[in-house]
Amino acid sequence: MSVEQRVELAKWIDAIGVDYIEGGFPSCSEADFEATKGISELGLNATICAFARAKAADIECAIKATEAANKSQVQILLTGSEVHLEKKRQFSLPDAVNEASEAVRIARTNGAQHISLGCEDAARGSLDMLKQVVAAGLEQGADCVVLADTVGAALPSEFEDKVRAIREFIGDDIELSVHCHNDMGLAVANTFAGLVGGADCAQVSLCGIGERAGNTAMEELATVIHYRGYEVGMQSRVDSIHMIKACRKLIDEISLVVSPQKPLIGRYVFSTAAGIHINGMLQDPECYEYVCPEHYGREREYIISRLSGRSVITDRLQKNNLPSSPELVDRMYRSIIKSKDVHKYNNNKQFYDFYIEQRNQIHSNTNQ
């Protein structure tokens, strides 16, 4: 996205009711700096976060980019696993501990008020290593810890256990956040598990966009919390209808290809084509509908298909105030299931034209 697109989208995201908006990685490029700076100057309700490596130049750049924000945070990338320690960074655990300590010291010296320790690949890191790195950063004044499942390798139960262990280690006064990727399709499940384990905050993205298979989808996590969070003492404050509008804004801005079955935002996620399901839902939608479309500004739809049966035809005729009879419905159904292009009858005009044609044929046969 261009700088202008990112700044505009930040307004939409802020209106959802989120606590943080990550403006970007200011030292990465001039565009990222300008986008983060532009977002910071909007006067949004959310805290504006800037990403930085554990380098003085990165940290100073991140602080400068967010200095106009009402509230700001710098998130410092730290090594959170032995895999990254040995194969990516190629240095020792004491080096990682010293890096965390020095990075936070630099951030504090440059005036950062809120500092987050972003522990990369923490899901694969040992608790011993994580505790040493985290402790070093907290001793210098960091006030937030982020545990990342950077490669989507965690299972919900083990991630919950790790989050709970770190929560017990840092106490209740330090904010604890989770950041999950979707490589095995578990980002939402792992994020929810992390919240159950004691995390205060979840890093998410609209539509789940992100590296490789993406990150935790905001709209999906918010839905899990809305419908099931009460069981574990959670609730979602987001504006669900505006959240879906923001998803649509993002989709349009980046021409995002979205599966028609993607939860909440997909074309067909509130559509039903199976006759058994339709029959039940016509009596009460709750029979086959757990997530309510109206909560997201969507509408349920009954799709004409070879499996939909006669009830969907009857329902559509009634909704359009078109007179019908069992004979007409049966005739229409039998013709539809023989058609090579059943889906065309979901178009209102083609359905109406087909209805008139079938009704006239019945009248013609009667007259004869």
Image (tube, grey):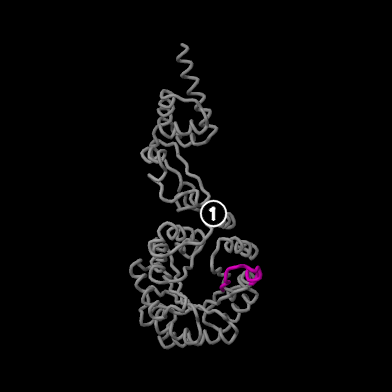
Numbered disc 1: secondary structure? helix
What is the three-letter code of the residue carrying label 1? Answer: Ile
Q: Which residue is situated farthest in the top direction here? A: 368
- Across and down, in percent, residue 341 comes to 46, 34
- Along the line of sight, the residue nearer the viewer: 283 or 33: 283
Work out whether residue 167 or residue 140 is closer to the camera in this orientation and state it. Answer: 167
Report the side of 29 relative to 84 (left or right): right
Verify whether residue 92 appears in magenta.
no
Q: Position of residue 27 (x, y in %)?
A: 59, 76
Q: Residue at x 60, y 61 (%)?
A: 9
Relative to the observer, which residue lies in front, 353 or 167? 167
User: Quarter of the image holding residue 278?
Assistant: top left
Residue 344 higher or lower than 267, as above or below: above
- The quarter in which the N terminus is drawn is bottom right
From the viewer's side, name the closer residue of 347 and 228. 228
- Residue 303: horizontal and vertical position, in percent? 45, 39
Taking the spot 45% from the left edge, 77% from the top edge, the residue there is 119
Q: In the displayed structure, does residue 126 sit left or right of residue 356?
A: left
Q: Report which residue position mark 1 lands on.
A: 241
Q: Residue at x 41, y 25 (%)?
A: 326
Quarter of the figure with residue 169: bottom left
Direction from residue 35 to residue 364 in the image, left or right: left
Residue 59: x and y, percent? 57, 81
Q: Which residues are magenta?
A: 37-49
